[in-house]
Amino acid sequence: MRPANWAERLHVLGVAGVRAPLAGLLDNRRPDRDDVVGTQRGQPVRRTSLTMSAQPVRRDGGQEVLELVVENKGLMTALFCAPHPLIEYRTDLFVANNHCFIPPGERRTISIRASTTPDGGLTLAQTGWRLDCWNADDVAIAPSEDILLAIGRRDKMCREFLDYANPKKTTSNTAVTLAGRRPDPLSLPFLLRTGAVVRLQFAMAASQAGRPAQLRIHTADQAAAVAPVVAISINGRPMEKQLPAGLGIQETDPAHLAFPDSAVFELAGGTPKAGTNMIEVREANDA
């Protein structure tokens, strides 16, 4: 049993007399040249495999606490294991035991704390988590079931994350339809022209029906001359929100910082229904 305040230390040793003895630590997918006598570069660190599970979220004062239990199932120490939020960019996190290492056959608990009233509106369970490791494949925990639909992350909803070498891929003048709980954001156009529409189709379980919901639509920039109006229709019920004017600059200069914003729609209970739902998103004015 470990004492209350304990620490672990990892020593990484490189072979003397070779060039870049730790190269295999940084790139463990490099060719393994054990059969080459007198090799001049470090050998790749052996890979391992991980599993991750989440404990029920608990409250501690004004914070919620999520504990991720990570277990090493392989034969090599897992190096520098770190959790990352899956569907939301969050800067409000306090992470204990971050970048930990896990010997073979052992497990470690990574504790994540955040305010119970986050600015982004998502709880720790709703956020979903991905764990990366220097020498193991990523493992993930999906957002909780009360997240009905999520596309990308708001810090990635701009043109520089798409193939803007081909502008036709980034602009939609027609209709785009995406289906599923977490559709691929690469199908989402960077710029939604007036008259174009994005349709989002998702399913809702009967046990979730009747509850109020919230829809957040994040932008990377808005037009400068005319403040845009975001119009949605969910199962035929129309709603609108006006966003403030932006810089209107990312269309011509994708790397330029702009004024992102979010349109937040409060949906009354029964608006999303059991079974298949359809959301349509369009620009209502000529911005």
Image: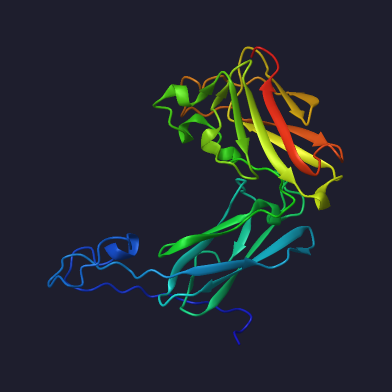
* Above or below 175: residue 201: below
Which image quarter: residue 234? top right
Asked whether, in this view, residue 205 is left or right of residue 222, the answer is: right
Q: Position of residue 109 (x, y in %)?
A: 60, 71
Report the quarter where the C terminus lies.
top right
Report the quarter where the N terminus lies.
bottom right
Q: Residue furthest front?
A: 275
Q: Position of residue 277 (x, y in %)?
A: 74, 37
Residue 119 in sight here = no
Front residue of 88 and 113: 88
The residue positioned 55% from the left and 41% from the top of the image is 184
Asked whether, in this view, residue 53 is left or right of residue 42, the answer is: right
Colour mode?
rainbow
Asked whether, in this view, residue 45 is left or right of residue 278, the answer is: left
The residue positioned 61% from the left and 40% from the top of the image is 151
Q: Position of residue 51 (x, y in %)?
A: 54, 68
Q: Position of residue 265 (x, y in %)?
A: 77, 33
Front residue of 215 and 148: 148
Asked whether, in this view, residue 55 is left or right of residue 133, the answer is: right
The residue positioned 54% from the left and 27% from the top of the image is 190
* Above or below 153: residue 250: above
Q: Residue furthest left?
A: 38
Residue 123 in sight here = yes
